[in-house]
Amino acid sequence: MPPSHAELRAQVERTTTIATVPHIVASLRALMDAPSPSTADIAEEIGKDQVLTAKVLKVVNSGFCGFNRPVTTIRHALVLLGLDVVRTLVVGSSIIDVFAERSGMLEGLWEHSLATARASHDLAAAARIEKPEEVAVAGLLHDFGKLLIAECFPDAYLEIRRVVQARDCLQIEAEREVLGATHGDVGMWLLKKWSLPSKLVYPVAYHNNFHPVREFADRTAVVHLADILVRAKGVGNAGDKQIPALDPEAWKLLDLTMDDVAHVSRLLDAESAAAFA
């Protein structure tokens, strides 16, 4: 019998490899929670940690928001992306390291995540959702629960991989059977521990379990559709060879056309071509 969600969550929150929040976050939280946060002060605080600054700028410039010019300073990133996005990238900087270290075990997942982030940004813009860059960050992190499962529950992860390969099923189906929780659940637990806002947490938690009455359903619908589109185009590797079914309620909520989706698909093609030029 799989452990309870409470037991699994406690184990995720105890992991030191990923769950350890950079020391700078406490001081950032105080600055960001001020009545009138100062972009200059926040940029200066992040800039004190040069390694962290480099990680954040690396992700910002990875193409997930479609900027035409390089973003070279944290202050510029704050102006373009806003406090919540930059805070999420700061807090999640450890994820970048672990993605790189586990590139063999999770080959292609980072590429899939980046492409989903870019598609999320463009679909959100097409659906006229405010601050599409925030939706892009949710797209970037949508599958990082898979990384957590591999890190926190290595034996269960190996069994999940065995089930996926034996049955040619979606990884989420194997997660439910083997672990009793999904990568959406696991990702949500850690993002909540990090005190990130619900508008970023909910799309990560529910992109494979959409419901139109949940808060931030429009953003969740975007990440749900972006994930499916990227899988269909074969960009990166989400951990299985299947394409999830599109939830009709998500499609209805976004009120997009197939021309909108085709346009985003062409943008992804252009990004992929540029990446391998």
Image: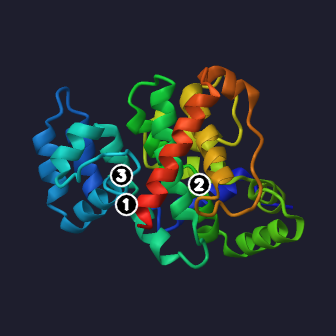
Question: Is the C terminus in the top left, top right, bottom left or bottom right quadrant?
Answer: bottom left
Q: Quadrant of residue 160?
A: bottom right
Residue under label 2, please give it. Answer: 143
Q: Is residue 16 left or right of residue 31?
A: right
Residue under label 1, please give it. Answer: 93
Q: Observer-nearest residue: 139 or 242?
A: 242
Question: Is the N terminus in the top left, top right, bottom left or bottom right quadrant?
Answer: bottom right
Q: Which mark is residue 268?
A: none
Give the SS element for disc 1: helix
Residue 219 appears at what percent x and percent y?
A: 54, 31
Residue 105 appears at what percent x and percent y?
A: 61, 76
**Marked residue nearer the N-terminal end (3 or 2):** 3
Give the SS element for disc 2: loop
Distance between the Cα atoms at labels 2 and 1?
A: 15 Å
Q: Is residue 55 above or below residue 223?
A: below
Residue type marked 3? Leu
Residue under label 3, please give it. Answer: 89
Task: Give the residue drawn at x 77%, y 60%.
Answer: 179
